[in-house]
Amino acid sequence: MKRTLINYLGLLGVVSLLSYTAAVIFSPSAYPGYNWMEQAVSDLSANNAPSKMLW
């Protein structure tokens, strides 16, 4: 069965979902005082965030 470009792009979608999920789970450990109930997820990847390198 021949793989088409759309099949490979679909796999990239799965990889991106998994990497984003891992970043959301593990980045708060590098951000002291981060409260997921009061702050947006985008705070984890802000320019001055302590968790930027981990993100």
Image: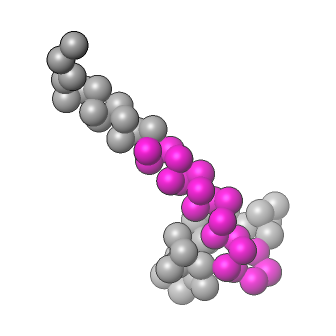
Q: Is residue 47 left or right of residue 41?
A: left
Q: Is residue 10 left or right of residue 42?
A: left
Q: Residue furthest front?
A: 1
40 magenta-colored: no
Rendered image quadrant of residue 25: bottom right
Q: Give the residue displayed 79% in from the left and 81% down from the top.
A: 33
Q: Is residue 7 above or below residue 48?
A: above
**Residue placed most toward the observer, 8 or 47:** 8
Image coords of residue 17 (percent x, y): 50, 44
* Coordinates of residue 23 in the picture (x, y in percent): 58, 61
* Span shown in magenta: 15-34
Which residue is at 81% across, 61% downward? 37
How is the protein colored in the picture? Answer: one colour
Which residue is painted at 54% across and 86% down in the image?
48
Residue 29 lies, in percent from the top left, at: 72, 74
Q: Quadrant of the N terminus?
A: top left
Please tell me whether residue 40 is drawn above or below residue 45 in the rendered image: above
Residue nearer the viewer, 40 or 24: 24
Examine the image and state in which quarter residue 54 appears.
Answer: bottom right
